Image (spheres, grey):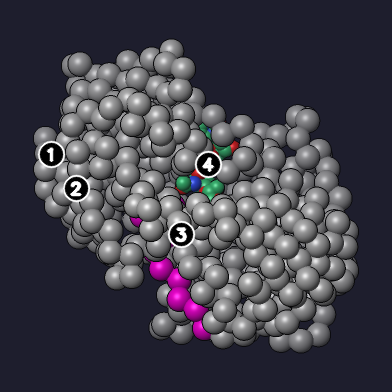
Amino acid sequence: MTNELKEKFVNPENDVLRVVGGKPLNGKIKVRGAKNFVSKAMVAALLAPGKSVLKNVPEIRDVHVVSDLLRLHGVNVDVDGPEGTVTIDASHVELANVADVDTLSGSSRIPILFSGPLLHRLGEAFIPALGGCNIGGRPIDFHLETLRKLGANVDKEHSDGIHITAPNGLKGAKIHLPYPSVGATEQTLLAAVLAEGKTELSGAAIEPEIMDLVSVLQKMGAIISVDVDRTFRIEGVKELKGYTHTSLTDRIEAASWASAALATHGDIFVKGATQPEMMTFLNVFRKIGGEFDVTDKGIRFWHPGGDLKPVAIETDVHPGFMTDWQQPLVVALTQAKGLSIVHETVYENRFGFTKPLVQMGATVQLYRECLGSLPCRFQQRNYKHSAVIFGPTPLTGRDIDVPDLRGGFSHLIAALAAEGPSTVRGISLIDRGYADFRGKLAALGADFE
Ligand code: EPZ
């Protein structure tokens, strides 16, 4: 990361936001490409010895972490932040110095996806210890099992990372995921496209971001089909070429701003937001009493006045209600009249962020029981993964420490909805996934410094 970027993303002086809430957020903002797609598409560029161009890329820290890791492997990466274009030339790829790779330890979860492309290009890969949000155990057993099935040797002995080799190349295999993991599905796609022979991946995830990655891989020359039962079939090809692609919009960011409009009695036009990927969110938004209007340019979300209504929702893999939509929406639900229930079935520990909400005046009770009917891996386990929210309760500003990306943005929304001043610390975590959120808050008339 350049000094300028370090200043922007990790400067402690940029890390505190003082917010005076109680004012509706009104105005227009633009949301660019999806964080959870662009980072993977950048890794895909490693598969081809040529130039790839990715457009509509947001200026977020995760993009710089992936760029840095690519550069450490000898790849040329040019990030034009204001333009939103990343150009990657992977004509030359080399093994990175382990000590250099280690400096990126704990910065993101994307490095594990470098495994397949590096095995194809170099026969080996060193993956630093992973980071990402603290919202559950987040193991990588499915990733490693997939790589082993494709013929890789995985050595976890290195204290800070994983060394993976494939001296005889990767070979197609039959793989079944015990749970439709987004990352493990991407891992398999990125590793199988150049593996010898056919790969069948059943029990896969089919999030729109994954399907956009499939589009990128197809542009590069891959042969991938998907059956109605979430089975991907990949026919390995001998080589791939660079791509030019425009990212789909970040539906998590769009839903976060929509929730902010509800929680603050505001009216926000989210330029770039698209309906198909947000269908499930829009249904819930409407049931709560929020209004929206879909146009060619984006979606306008607003609070029409009157009482918001409570809902019962369960998070799930696509096409279910995304776990990443849950946290910002819970803040809006504190303002709905009655009892709302949220059953989190993707992560075992994604309600930690509700504690500061309660301190601000919200009524949120957490339960170990499954308060819903979806089959859930956390049943009879000791995780508080269901929440009951009773509202409306006025929120009062206070000091908050940001716990994770989505939880942090939710705290920001709560501070904006609350009466009085709040100090939100650790906001650089929010830069991981919300491009220029300070500029957007200013455009929406938020009172902060
Ligand atoms: C991706 O994480 C996203 N991150 C997450 O977004 C998102 O919440 C998640 O998918 C679900 O949609 C990125 O794309 C960078 P998973 P990922 O593998 O791929 C378990 C955000 O806020 N699991 O689908 O890491 C895991 O513990 C972030 O933008 C295993 O048990 O998620 C979890 O309970 C947060 N073993 C569940 O599967 C494995 O090997 C789903 O995880 C892998 C996963």
Is the residue under label 3 in contact with that under label 4 (CB below 8 Å)?
no
Q: Mark 2 sits on what residue?
A: 76
* Residue 8's disc number: 3
Earlier in the chain: of badge 2 and badge 1, it is 2
Mark 4 vs mark 2, foreground winner is 2
Position in image of residue 351 (x %, y %)? 73, 47
Label 2 SS: strand
Q: Residue at x 83, y 43 (%)?
A: 367
Crowdedness near tag 4: few (<14), some (14–19) or many (≥20) residues, C-alpha within 10 Å: some
Is the residue under label 1 in contact with that under label 2 (CB below 8 Å)?
yes
Is the residue under label 3 in contact with that under label 1 (CB below 8 Å)?
no
Q: CA distance from mark 4 to mark 1?
A: 29 Å
Asked if residue 363 lies in the magenta stretch, the reply is no
Earlier in the chain: of badge 4 and badge 3, it is 3
Earlier in the chain: of badge 1 and badge 3, it is 3
Earlier in the chain: of badge 4 and badge 2, it is 2
Q: CA distance from mark 4 to mark 3?
A: 19 Å
* Residue 92's disc number: 1
Q: Which residues are magenta?
A: 28-40
Q: Residue at x 28, y 64 (%)?
A: 80
